[in-house]
Image: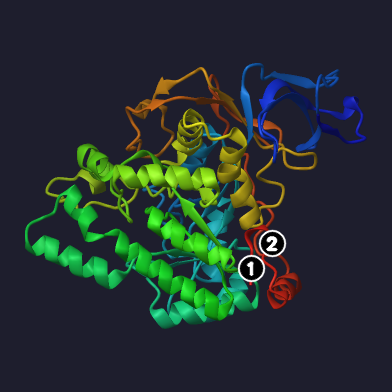
Amino acid sequence: MGEKTDLPAAGWTTVIKGGDIVLPDAAEPQRLDIAIAGGAIAAIGPELDAAGADIVDASGLLVLPGGVDVHVHFNEPNMGHWEGFPTGSAALAAGGVTAYADMPLNGLPATVDRAALALKASCAEGRSAVDYAFWGGLVPGKLEELEPLAEAGVVGFKAFVSKPGGEGEGRFVEADDWTLYEGMRRIASFGGVLALHAENDSMTTALGDSMRRAGRVGALDFAASRPPVAELEAVHRALFYAELTGCRLHFVHISHPDSVERIDRARRDGLDVTVETCPHYLMLTADDMARIGPVAKCAPPLRDAESVERLWAQLAEGKIDLVASDHSPSPIELKAGPGLSFFDAWGGISGAQSTVELVLGEGLRRGIPAGRLAQVLAGAPAERFGLTGKGGIAVGKDADLALIDRSAGYTLESGHLQYLHPNSPYTGMRMDVRVVRTLLRGQVVYSLDGGVVPAGGVRTAGGLGAPAERRQAAEAGTGGAFGGR
Protein backbone atom coordinates (compact mmCIF):
# COMPACT_ATOMS: atom_id res chain seq x y z
CA MET A 1 0.00 0.00 0.00
CA GLY A 2 1.22 3.55 -0.64
CA GLU A 3 1.00 6.47 -3.00
CA LYS A 4 3.44 8.13 -5.37
CA THR A 5 3.74 11.31 -7.36
CA ASP A 6 5.18 11.51 -10.86
CA LEU A 7 8.39 13.03 -9.48
CA PRO A 8 11.31 10.77 -10.46
CA ALA A 9 13.40 9.21 -7.73
CA ALA A 10 16.34 11.37 -8.81
CA GLY A 11 14.42 14.39 -7.53
CA TRP A 12 14.04 13.01 -4.03
CA THR A 13 16.33 14.58 -1.48
CA THR A 14 15.64 12.15 1.39
CA VAL A 15 14.07 8.73 1.77
CA ILE A 16 12.92 7.42 5.16
CA LYS A 17 13.48 3.67 4.83
CA GLY A 18 11.73 0.80 6.54
CA GLY A 19 9.78 2.57 9.26
CA ASP A 20 6.42 1.57 10.69
CA ILE A 21 4.41 4.42 9.21
CA VAL A 22 1.26 5.73 10.89
CA LEU A 23 -0.95 6.77 7.96
CA PRO A 24 -4.27 8.59 8.27
CA ASP A 25 -7.21 6.21 8.73
CA ALA A 26 -4.98 3.11 8.82
CA ALA A 27 -5.82 0.63 11.56
CA GLU A 28 -2.17 -0.34 12.12
CA PRO A 29 1.26 1.09 11.22
CA GLN A 30 2.60 -0.15 7.88
CA ARG A 31 6.18 -0.98 6.91
CA LEU A 32 6.76 1.58 4.13
CA ASP A 33 9.24 4.15 2.85
CA ILE A 34 8.67 7.90 2.63
CA ALA A 35 10.34 10.00 -0.07
CA ILE A 36 10.84 13.73 0.47
CA ALA A 37 11.41 16.51 -2.07
CA GLY A 38 11.15 20.26 -1.66
CA GLY A 39 10.25 19.91 1.99
CA ALA A 40 7.13 17.87 1.23
CA ILE A 41 6.24 14.19 1.09
CA ALA A 42 6.69 13.12 -2.53
CA ALA A 43 5.93 9.39 -2.34
CA ILE A 44 4.93 6.68 0.10
CA GLY A 45 5.37 3.03 -0.72
CA PRO A 46 7.30 -0.19 -0.14
CA GLU A 47 10.98 -0.39 -1.12
CA LEU A 48 11.22 3.00 -2.82
CA ASP A 49 14.27 3.56 -5.00
CA ALA A 50 16.52 5.85 -2.93
CA ALA A 51 19.26 6.32 -5.52
CA GLY A 52 20.86 9.74 -5.12
CA ALA A 53 18.89 10.59 -1.99
CA ASP A 54 19.96 10.80 1.63
CA ILE A 55 18.73 7.73 3.46
CA VAL A 56 17.30 7.77 6.98
CA ASP A 57 17.15 4.26 8.39
CA ALA A 58 13.89 3.99 10.34
CA SER A 59 14.01 0.22 10.81
CA GLY A 60 12.19 -0.74 13.97
CA LEU A 61 10.97 2.82 14.53
CA LEU A 62 7.44 4.14 14.61
CA VAL A 63 7.03 7.10 12.23
CA LEU A 64 4.30 9.56 13.21
CA PRO A 65 3.34 12.92 11.75
CA GLY A 66 5.11 15.65 13.68
CA GLY A 67 3.03 16.70 16.64
CA VAL A 68 0.94 19.89 16.48
CA ASP A 69 0.68 21.61 19.88
CA VAL A 70 -1.95 24.33 19.65
CA HIS A 71 -1.67 25.43 23.29
CA VAL A 72 1.68 26.80 24.45
CA HIS A 73 2.69 29.94 26.33
CA PHE A 74 6.13 31.15 25.28
CA ASN A 75 5.60 34.50 27.00
CA GLU A 76 7.13 36.87 24.50
CA PRO A 77 7.29 39.82 24.20
CA ASN A 78 8.88 41.09 27.41
CA MET A 79 8.48 37.91 29.45
CA GLY A 80 11.15 35.80 27.77
CA HIS A 81 12.87 35.37 31.12
CA TRP A 82 10.05 32.89 31.87
CA GLU A 83 10.34 31.13 28.52
CA GLY A 84 10.97 32.39 25.01
CA PHE A 85 10.60 31.11 21.48
CA PRO A 86 14.14 29.64 21.26
CA THR A 87 13.93 27.41 24.34
CA GLY A 88 10.23 26.61 24.14
CA SER A 89 10.42 25.58 20.49
CA ALA A 90 13.59 23.57 21.14
CA ALA A 91 11.68 21.59 23.75
CA LEU A 92 8.94 20.90 21.22
CA ALA A 93 11.45 19.74 18.60
CA ALA A 94 13.03 17.37 21.13
CA GLY A 95 9.56 16.06 21.88
CA GLY A 96 8.61 15.28 18.27
CA VAL A 97 6.45 18.38 17.74
CA THR A 98 6.87 20.32 14.49
CA ALA A 99 4.25 23.07 14.75
CA TYR A 100 2.62 25.04 17.53
CA ALA A 101 0.21 27.89 18.17
CA ASP A 102 1.30 30.38 20.80
CA MET A 103 -1.32 31.78 23.16
CA PRO A 104 -1.95 35.54 23.55
CA LEU A 105 -0.72 35.50 27.17
CA ASN A 106 1.51 35.76 29.22
CA GLY A 107 3.54 38.16 27.12
CA LEU A 108 3.28 41.91 27.64
CA PRO A 109 1.39 43.35 25.90
CA ALA A 110 -1.10 40.55 25.39
CA THR A 111 -1.90 39.72 21.76
CA VAL A 112 -5.26 41.47 21.62
CA ASP A 113 -4.67 43.84 18.68
CA ARG A 114 -2.66 43.94 15.46
CA ALA A 115 0.16 46.00 16.95
CA ALA A 116 0.72 43.45 19.70
CA LEU A 117 0.54 40.61 17.15
CA ALA A 118 3.19 42.29 15.01
CA LEU A 119 5.42 42.69 18.06
CA LYS A 120 5.03 39.01 18.96
CA ALA A 121 5.70 37.95 15.38
CA SER A 122 8.92 39.96 15.36
CA CYS A 123 10.03 38.13 18.50
CA ALA A 124 9.46 34.73 16.90
CA GLU A 125 10.92 35.39 13.45
CA GLY A 126 14.19 33.53 12.95
CA ARG A 127 14.20 32.25 16.54
CA SER A 128 11.95 29.17 16.49
CA ALA A 129 13.19 25.62 15.97
CA VAL A 130 9.84 24.52 14.49
CA ASP A 131 6.94 26.13 12.62
CA TYR A 132 4.46 28.30 14.48
CA ALA A 133 1.24 30.27 14.44
CA PHE A 134 -0.43 32.67 16.86
CA TRP A 135 -3.67 33.06 18.77
CA GLY A 136 -5.45 36.35 19.29
CA GLY A 137 -7.33 37.26 22.44
CA LEU A 138 -10.90 38.20 23.33
CA VAL A 139 -10.90 40.73 26.17
CA PRO A 140 -13.13 43.63 27.25
CA GLY A 141 -12.70 46.80 25.25
CA LYS A 142 -11.12 45.14 22.24
CA LEU A 143 -14.09 43.77 20.32
CA GLU A 144 -13.26 45.93 17.30
CA GLU A 145 -9.86 44.22 17.07
CA LEU A 146 -11.23 40.73 16.47
CA GLU A 147 -11.66 40.86 12.71
CA PRO A 148 -8.39 42.75 12.10
CA LEU A 149 -6.59 40.01 14.01
CA ALA A 150 -8.35 37.42 11.88
CA GLU A 151 -7.24 39.28 8.77
CA ALA A 152 -3.68 39.17 10.13
CA GLY A 153 -3.77 35.39 10.33
CA VAL A 154 -4.41 34.29 13.90
CA VAL A 155 -5.71 30.73 14.21
CA GLY A 156 -8.49 31.76 16.59
CA PHE A 157 -9.24 33.68 19.76
CA LYS A 158 -8.65 32.78 23.39
CA ALA A 159 -10.86 33.92 26.24
CA PHE A 160 -11.02 33.33 29.98
CA VAL A 161 -14.11 33.51 32.14
CA SER A 162 -11.93 33.23 35.25
CA LYS A 163 -8.99 35.40 36.25
CA PRO A 164 -5.93 34.43 34.16
CA GLY A 165 -3.35 35.76 36.61
CA GLY A 166 -0.21 37.66 35.76
CA GLU A 167 0.83 41.24 36.34
CA GLY A 168 1.86 44.32 34.40
CA GLU A 169 0.38 46.87 32.06
CA GLY A 170 -1.13 45.27 29.00
CA ARG A 171 -1.70 41.91 30.66
CA PHE A 172 -4.49 39.59 29.55
CA VAL A 173 -7.80 39.86 31.47
CA GLU A 174 -10.94 37.78 31.69
CA ALA A 175 -14.07 38.36 29.62
CA ASP A 176 -17.29 39.41 31.33
CA ASP A 177 -20.47 37.73 30.13
CA TRP A 178 -21.34 40.48 27.65
CA THR A 179 -17.86 40.51 26.16
CA LEU A 180 -18.01 36.73 25.80
CA TYR A 181 -21.44 36.74 24.16
CA GLU A 182 -20.82 39.70 21.86
CA GLY A 183 -17.33 38.45 21.03
CA MET A 184 -18.72 35.07 20.05
CA ARG A 185 -21.36 36.76 17.90
CA ARG A 186 -18.70 38.76 16.07
CA ILE A 187 -16.33 35.81 15.71
CA ALA A 188 -19.20 33.78 14.22
CA SER A 189 -19.88 36.52 11.68
CA PHE A 190 -16.53 35.88 9.98
CA GLY A 191 -16.26 32.14 10.64
CA GLY A 192 -13.68 32.28 13.40
CA VAL A 193 -13.25 29.99 16.39
CA LEU A 194 -13.14 30.80 20.09
CA ALA A 195 -11.02 28.82 22.55
CA LEU A 196 -12.23 29.06 26.13
CA HIS A 197 -10.72 28.54 29.56
CA ALA A 198 -13.87 27.33 31.31
CA GLU A 199 -14.02 27.86 35.06
CA ASN A 200 -16.70 29.83 36.92
CA ASP A 201 -14.80 32.69 38.55
CA SER A 202 -17.33 33.49 41.25
CA MET A 203 -17.22 29.89 42.46
CA THR A 204 -13.44 29.57 42.46
CA THR A 205 -12.91 33.00 44.05
CA ALA A 206 -15.41 32.37 46.86
CA LEU A 207 -14.04 28.92 47.60
CA GLY A 208 -10.44 30.10 47.41
CA ASP A 209 -11.07 33.00 49.78
CA SER A 210 -12.81 30.63 52.21
CA MET A 211 -9.88 28.22 52.12
CA ARG A 212 -7.38 31.00 52.82
CA ARG A 213 -9.40 32.34 55.75
CA ALA A 214 -9.44 28.85 57.25
CA GLY A 215 -5.68 28.48 56.77
CA ARG A 216 -6.20 25.66 54.29
CA VAL A 217 -3.59 26.44 51.64
CA GLY A 218 -2.23 23.03 50.61
CA ALA A 219 -2.45 21.22 47.28
CA LEU A 220 -5.65 19.31 48.04
CA ASP A 221 -7.23 22.49 49.39
CA PHE A 222 -6.40 24.21 46.11
CA ALA A 223 -8.00 21.34 44.18
CA ALA A 224 -11.12 21.58 46.37
CA SER A 225 -11.33 25.33 45.69
CA ARG A 226 -11.71 24.70 41.94
CA PRO A 227 -14.19 21.79 41.84
CA PRO A 228 -15.48 20.08 38.69
CA VAL A 229 -18.78 21.96 38.94
CA ALA A 230 -16.94 25.25 38.32
CA GLU A 231 -15.68 23.86 35.01
CA LEU A 232 -18.99 22.28 34.09
CA GLU A 233 -21.00 25.47 34.74
CA ALA A 234 -18.71 27.50 32.49
CA VAL A 235 -18.96 24.82 29.79
CA HIS A 236 -22.78 24.97 29.94
CA ARG A 237 -22.74 28.77 29.69
CA ALA A 238 -20.41 28.84 26.70
CA LEU A 239 -22.37 26.15 24.89
CA PHE A 240 -25.54 28.20 25.42
CA TYR A 241 -23.85 31.27 23.90
CA ALA A 242 -22.55 29.15 21.03
CA GLU A 243 -26.07 27.91 20.33
CA LEU A 244 -27.34 31.49 20.26
CA THR A 245 -24.53 32.94 18.15
CA GLY A 246 -23.44 30.05 15.94
CA CYS A 247 -19.83 30.56 17.06
CA ARG A 248 -17.38 27.72 16.51
CA LEU A 249 -16.10 26.77 19.95
CA HIS A 250 -13.07 24.97 21.34
CA PHE A 251 -12.64 24.13 25.02
CA VAL A 252 -9.05 24.15 26.19
CA HIS A 253 -7.52 21.93 28.91
CA ILE A 254 -10.74 20.22 30.00
CA SER A 255 -9.96 18.35 33.21
CA HIS A 256 -13.08 16.39 34.07
CA PRO A 257 -14.93 13.66 32.15
CA ASP A 258 -18.36 15.09 32.99
CA SER A 259 -17.43 18.20 31.01
CA VAL A 260 -16.33 16.03 28.09
CA GLU A 261 -19.68 14.24 28.10
CA ARG A 262 -21.57 17.53 28.09
CA ILE A 263 -19.51 18.84 25.16
CA ASP A 264 -19.92 15.59 23.25
CA ARG A 265 -23.69 15.79 23.69
CA ALA A 266 -23.68 19.34 22.31
CA ARG A 267 -21.70 18.21 19.30
CA ARG A 268 -24.14 15.40 18.62
CA ASP A 269 -26.90 18.00 18.82
CA GLY A 270 -25.23 19.93 16.00
CA LEU A 271 -22.90 22.49 17.59
CA ASP A 272 -19.47 22.99 16.01
CA VAL A 273 -17.48 22.36 19.17
CA THR A 274 -14.24 20.55 20.01
CA VAL A 275 -12.56 19.59 23.25
CA GLU A 276 -8.92 19.44 24.28
CA THR A 277 -7.31 17.83 27.30
CA CYS A 278 -3.69 17.80 28.41
CA PRO A 279 -1.14 15.14 29.33
CA HIS A 280 -1.22 16.17 32.99
CA TYR A 281 -4.92 15.32 33.25
CA LEU A 282 -4.21 11.94 31.67
CA MET A 283 -1.11 11.08 33.70
CA LEU A 284 -1.40 12.75 37.12
CA THR A 285 -3.93 13.06 39.95
CA ALA A 286 -4.59 15.54 42.76
CA ASP A 287 -2.70 13.20 45.08
CA ASP A 288 0.28 13.43 42.70
CA MET A 289 -0.04 17.21 42.86
CA ALA A 290 0.24 17.03 46.66
CA ARG A 291 3.23 14.69 46.40
CA ILE A 292 5.11 16.60 43.68
CA GLY A 293 4.30 20.10 44.91
CA PRO A 294 3.65 23.38 43.06
CA VAL A 295 5.54 22.22 39.96
CA ALA A 296 2.33 20.23 39.32
CA LYS A 297 -0.05 23.11 40.07
CA CYS A 298 -2.42 24.08 37.24
CA ALA A 299 -5.91 25.43 36.69
CA PRO A 300 -8.22 23.64 36.37
CA PRO A 301 -6.48 21.44 38.94
CA LEU A 302 -5.62 17.79 38.65
CA ARG A 303 -8.50 15.46 39.48
CA ASP A 304 -8.87 11.97 40.97
CA ALA A 305 -7.78 8.58 39.62
CA GLU A 306 -11.29 7.71 38.41
CA SER A 307 -11.34 10.87 36.28
CA VAL A 308 -8.01 9.90 34.72
CA GLU A 309 -9.39 6.51 33.71
CA ARG A 310 -12.56 8.00 32.28
CA LEU A 311 -10.62 10.59 30.26
CA TRP A 312 -8.52 7.84 28.66
CA ALA A 313 -11.70 5.95 27.76
CA GLN A 314 -13.18 9.10 26.23
CA LEU A 315 -10.01 9.71 24.23
CA ALA A 316 -10.16 6.18 22.85
CA GLU A 317 -13.85 6.62 21.98
CA GLY A 318 -13.23 9.84 20.04
CA LYS A 319 -15.00 12.14 22.49
CA ILE A 320 -11.77 14.05 23.12
CA ASP A 321 -10.59 15.69 19.91
CA LEU A 322 -7.02 16.61 20.71
CA VAL A 323 -4.29 16.71 23.34
CA ALA A 324 -2.16 19.83 23.85
CA SER A 325 0.47 20.61 26.46
CA ASP A 326 -0.77 23.95 27.86
CA HIS A 327 2.93 24.59 28.45
CA SER A 328 2.88 27.42 30.99
CA PRO A 329 6.37 27.86 32.45
CA SER A 330 7.81 30.19 35.06
CA PRO A 331 11.06 30.65 36.97
CA ILE A 332 11.35 28.08 39.75
CA GLU A 333 11.26 30.76 42.46
CA LEU A 334 7.63 31.47 41.46
CA LYS A 335 6.85 27.82 42.07
CA ALA A 336 8.93 27.12 45.17
CA GLY A 337 10.08 30.44 46.58
CA PRO A 338 10.45 30.94 50.35
CA GLY A 339 7.15 31.49 52.12
CA LEU A 340 4.97 30.65 49.11
CA SER A 341 1.82 28.72 49.90
CA PHE A 342 0.42 26.37 47.28
CA PHE A 343 -2.26 28.99 46.54
CA ASP A 344 0.37 31.68 45.94
CA ALA A 345 2.61 29.60 43.64
CA TRP A 346 2.37 30.20 39.89
CA GLY A 347 -0.24 27.91 38.36
CA GLY A 348 1.18 26.42 35.21
CA ILE A 349 2.83 23.19 34.08
CA SER A 350 5.96 22.89 31.94
CA GLY A 351 5.24 19.92 29.72
CA ALA A 352 5.67 20.73 26.03
CA GLN A 353 8.65 18.43 25.54
CA SER A 354 6.88 15.37 26.96
CA THR A 355 3.43 15.42 25.35
CA VAL A 356 4.08 13.01 22.47
CA GLU A 357 6.09 10.55 24.54
CA LEU A 358 3.57 10.51 27.39
CA VAL A 359 0.42 10.16 25.29
CA LEU A 360 1.90 7.71 22.82
CA GLY A 361 3.60 5.54 25.43
CA GLU A 362 0.65 5.33 27.79
CA GLY A 363 -1.89 5.14 24.97
CA LEU A 364 -0.16 2.19 23.32
CA ARG A 365 0.14 0.47 26.70
CA ARG A 366 -3.62 0.82 27.06
CA GLY A 367 -4.20 -0.69 23.61
CA ILE A 368 -5.27 2.50 21.83
CA PRO A 369 -4.28 2.30 18.13
CA ALA A 370 -1.35 4.41 17.05
CA GLY A 371 -3.54 6.04 14.39
CA ARG A 372 -5.97 7.32 17.01
CA LEU A 373 -3.08 8.71 19.07
CA ALA A 374 -1.59 10.41 16.00
CA GLN A 375 -4.96 11.98 15.33
CA VAL A 376 -5.23 13.63 18.75
CA LEU A 377 -1.57 14.71 18.72
CA ALA A 378 -1.34 15.99 15.14
CA GLY A 379 -4.23 15.44 12.72
CA ALA A 380 -7.12 16.99 14.64
CA PRO A 381 -5.32 20.13 15.87
CA ALA A 382 -3.95 20.85 12.39
CA GLU A 383 -7.38 20.44 10.83
CA ARG A 384 -9.33 22.34 13.45
CA PHE A 385 -7.09 25.40 13.30
CA GLY A 386 -6.29 25.40 9.60
CA LEU A 387 -2.55 24.66 9.79
CA THR A 388 -2.07 23.90 6.12
CA GLY A 389 0.24 21.03 5.29
CA LYS A 390 0.52 19.84 8.88
CA GLY A 391 -0.79 16.93 10.87
CA GLY A 392 -0.55 13.86 8.65
CA ILE A 393 1.64 11.60 6.55
CA ALA A 394 0.36 11.90 2.98
CA VAL A 395 1.75 12.93 -0.41
CA GLY A 396 1.82 16.71 -0.64
CA LYS A 397 1.90 17.29 3.10
CA ASP A 398 4.89 18.91 4.74
CA ALA A 399 7.53 16.30 5.56
CA ASP A 400 7.05 16.83 9.30
CA LEU A 401 7.87 13.54 10.99
CA ALA A 402 8.64 12.15 14.44
CA LEU A 403 10.69 8.94 14.56
CA ILE A 404 10.03 7.09 17.79
CA ASP A 405 11.74 4.11 19.38
CA ARG A 406 9.25 1.92 21.24
CA SER A 407 12.04 -0.11 22.85
CA ALA A 408 14.08 2.77 24.27
CA GLY A 409 12.20 3.58 27.45
CA TYR A 410 14.01 5.93 29.80
CA THR A 411 13.59 7.94 32.98
CA LEU A 412 13.12 11.66 32.36
CA GLU A 413 15.74 13.80 34.08
CA SER A 414 15.98 17.58 34.33
CA GLY A 415 19.12 17.43 32.18
CA HIS A 416 17.02 16.15 29.27
CA LEU A 417 14.80 19.24 29.27
CA GLN A 418 15.28 22.08 26.82
CA TYR A 419 13.22 24.60 28.80
CA LEU A 420 14.76 27.82 30.03
CA HIS A 421 13.83 26.68 33.54
CA PRO A 422 14.14 22.87 33.47
CA ASN A 423 11.44 21.91 35.93
CA SER A 424 8.60 19.56 35.12
CA PRO A 425 6.16 17.37 37.08
CA TYR A 426 7.25 14.51 34.81
CA THR A 427 10.87 14.57 35.99
CA GLY A 428 11.64 11.13 37.43
CA MET A 429 8.83 9.50 35.43
CA ARG A 430 9.52 6.47 33.28
CA MET A 431 8.82 7.11 29.59
CA ASP A 432 7.85 4.01 27.62
CA VAL A 433 8.90 5.43 24.24
CA ARG A 434 11.50 7.94 23.06
CA VAL A 435 11.65 10.45 20.23
CA VAL A 436 14.96 9.82 18.46
CA ARG A 437 14.60 12.16 15.47
CA THR A 438 12.32 15.01 14.39
CA LEU A 439 12.11 16.26 10.79
CA LEU A 440 10.63 19.63 9.86
CA ARG A 441 9.82 19.93 6.15
CA GLY A 442 12.36 17.16 5.51
CA GLN A 443 15.17 18.68 7.58
CA VAL A 444 16.37 17.15 10.84
CA VAL A 445 15.67 19.63 13.64
CA TYR A 446 16.34 17.18 16.48
CA SER A 447 18.22 13.93 16.90
CA LEU A 448 18.97 12.05 20.06
CA ASP A 449 22.71 12.14 19.45
CA GLY A 450 22.95 15.62 17.90
CA GLY A 451 20.40 17.64 19.87
CA VAL A 452 18.27 20.50 18.53
CA VAL A 453 19.03 22.48 15.38
CA PRO A 454 17.77 26.00 16.25
CA ALA A 455 15.86 28.57 14.22
CA GLY A 456 14.58 26.40 11.38
CA GLY A 457 10.91 27.23 11.88
CA VAL A 458 8.72 29.74 10.07
CA ARG A 459 5.24 31.09 10.59
CA THR A 460 3.01 28.47 9.06
CA ALA A 461 0.18 29.07 6.63
CA GLY A 462 -3.34 28.52 7.83
CA GLY A 463 -5.54 30.12 10.38
CA LEU A 464 -8.94 31.47 9.50
CA GLY A 465 -8.54 31.85 5.74
CA ALA A 466 -9.55 34.68 3.42
CA PRO A 467 -12.37 37.01 4.59
CA ALA A 468 -14.73 36.08 1.75
CA GLU A 469 -14.19 32.37 2.34
CA ARG A 470 -14.77 32.73 6.08
CA ARG A 471 -17.95 34.72 5.63
CA GLN A 472 -19.26 32.34 2.99
CA ALA A 473 -18.65 29.36 5.27
CA ALA A 474 -20.22 31.14 8.22
CA GLU A 475 -23.32 32.10 6.24
CA ALA A 476 -23.61 28.55 4.89
CA GLY A 477 -23.36 27.14 8.41
CA THR A 478 -20.76 24.58 7.41
CA GLY A 479 -18.52 23.20 10.11
CA GLY A 480 -16.25 20.70 8.39
CA ALA A 481 -15.30 17.44 10.01
CA PHE A 482 -16.21 18.67 13.48
CA GLY A 483 -19.84 19.32 12.71
CA GLY A 484 -21.64 22.65 12.79
CA ARG A 485 -24.93 24.39 12.72
Disc 1, SS: loop
Q: Is residue 51 above or below residue 190?
A: above
Amino acid of disc 1: Gly
Residue holding disc 2: 480
Q: Is residue 227 above or below residue 236?
A: above
* Rendered location of residue 414, percent (x, y): 35, 29
Amino acid of disc 2: Gly
* Rendered location of residue 371, percent (x, y): 62, 37
Q: Is residue 58 left or right of residue 327?
A: right
User: Which image quadrant is residue 248 in?
Assistant: bottom right
Q: Is residue 337 above or below residue 275?
A: above
Which quadrant is home to the C terminus?
Answer: bottom right
Disc 2, SS: helix
Which quadrant is home to the N terminus?
Answer: top right
Q: Is residue 418 left or right of residue 298?
A: right
Q: Residues within 10 Å of mark 2 (few under 14, many from 20)?
A: few
Residue at horizontal 68%, vertical 41%? 392
Contact check, label 1 and label 2, Cβ < 8 Å: yes
* Rendered location of residue 362, percent (x, y): 45, 32
User: Which image quadrant is residue 93 in?
Assistant: top right
Q: Residues within 10 Å of mark 1 (few under 14, many from 20)?
A: many
How much space separates mark 1 and mark 2, taking CA atoms? 7 Å
Q: Is residue 461 left or right of residue 427?
A: right
Residue at horizontal 15%, vertical 51%? 341
Residue holding disc 1: 484
Residue 455 in sight from this viewpoint: no
Residue 242 in sight from this viewpoint: yes
